[in-house]
Image (spheres, helix red, strand yellow):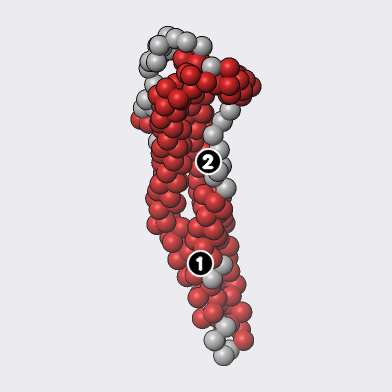
């Protein structure tokens, strides 16, 4: 019976792991904060440029924000699916260990039904020696399996961190570039004037999921 709870505990651990995913929070930097303040100041100093510049760059900033949300959710979705797949791959091993343990328990239960005391004790002695070997093997296999699962999950967590870090970096770079162009526009440069690189697209195949 003890091993029957192992699957439930494993799924509970998975639920806790997935439930602890970092919440979506757009990253910022002192430079972005400074550029935002500069935009506010320039919009006051150059009101004639405010409507045209914010009208052009406002949607672009929203696009950068939406792209970050898409990238972030793609990272966490890939992590959830790959983590669930790990547990699914180990289901047969878990059920196999549970079956071995249940068989041993049932064998001892059969010994307890023997009326003759001598035969009953002999039954316990005989199966006890055998089951001690079986239980040791179960323990060793379970320990090895648990360590392997933890290692596989840790790999997925590392891949998640890399994926989110890339999304954060691209968001910061693109947001910084958009604010720099917005401020240049507010300073009198033509709308659409840019010296920045194009928006970066994340290749999720390179993140390891």
Residue closer to the observer: 21 or 152: 21
Residue occupying image coordinates x 57% and y 48%: 20
- The disc at residue 136 is none
Residue tagged 2: 24
| Mark 2 residue element | loop
Q: Residue at x 54, y 71 (%)?
A: 1
Q: N-terminal of the two: label 2 or label 1?
A: 1
Alpha carbons under labels 2 and 1: distance apart: 36 Å
| Residue 127, placed above or below residue 185 | below
Question: In terms of image quadrants, where is residue 122?
Answer: bottom right
Is residue 73 visible to us here?
yes
Residue in front for this viewpoint, 44 or 84: 44
Residue appearing at x 50%, y 57% in the figure: 11
Q: What secondary structure is found at the residue carrying circle 1? A: helix
Q: Which residue is mark 1?
A: 4
- Neighbourhood count class around disc 1 (C-alpha, 10 Å): few under 14, some 14–19, many 20 upward: some
Viewer can see residue 71 = no
Residue 149 to residue 92: above or below = above
Residue 127 percent coordinates (x, y): 54, 70
Q: Quadrant of residue 208?
A: top left
* Residue 88 rendering spot, x and y as whole percentages: 40, 53
Dots 2 and 1: beta carbons under 8 Å?
no
């Amino acid at each position: 019976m003890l091993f029957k709870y192992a699957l439930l505990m494993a799924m509970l651990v998975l639920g806790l792991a997935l439930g602890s995913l970092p919440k979506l929070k757009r990253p910022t930097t002192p430079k972005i904060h400074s550029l935002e303040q500069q935009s506010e100041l320039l919009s006051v100093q150059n009101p004639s440029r405010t409507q045209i510049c914010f009208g052009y760059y406002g949607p672009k900033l929203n696009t950068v924000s939406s792209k970050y949300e898409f990238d972030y959710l793609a990272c966490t979705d890939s992590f959830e699916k790959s983590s669930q797949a790990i547990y699914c791959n180990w289901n047969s091993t878990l059920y196999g260990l549970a079956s071995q343990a249940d068989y041993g328990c049932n064998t001892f239960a059969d010994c307890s039904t023997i009326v003759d005391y001598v035969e009953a004790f002999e039954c316990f002695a005989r199966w006890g020696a055998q089951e001690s070997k079986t239980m040791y093997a179960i323990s060793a296999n379970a320990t090895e399996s648990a360590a392997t699962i933890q290692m596989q999950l840790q790999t997925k967590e590392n891949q998640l961190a890399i994926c989110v870090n890339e999304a954060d970096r691209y968001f910061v770079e693109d947001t910084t570039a958009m604010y720099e162009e917005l401020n240049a526009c507010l300073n009198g440069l033509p709308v659409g004037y840019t010296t920045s690189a194009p928006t970066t697209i994340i290749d999720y195949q390179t993140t390891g999921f």
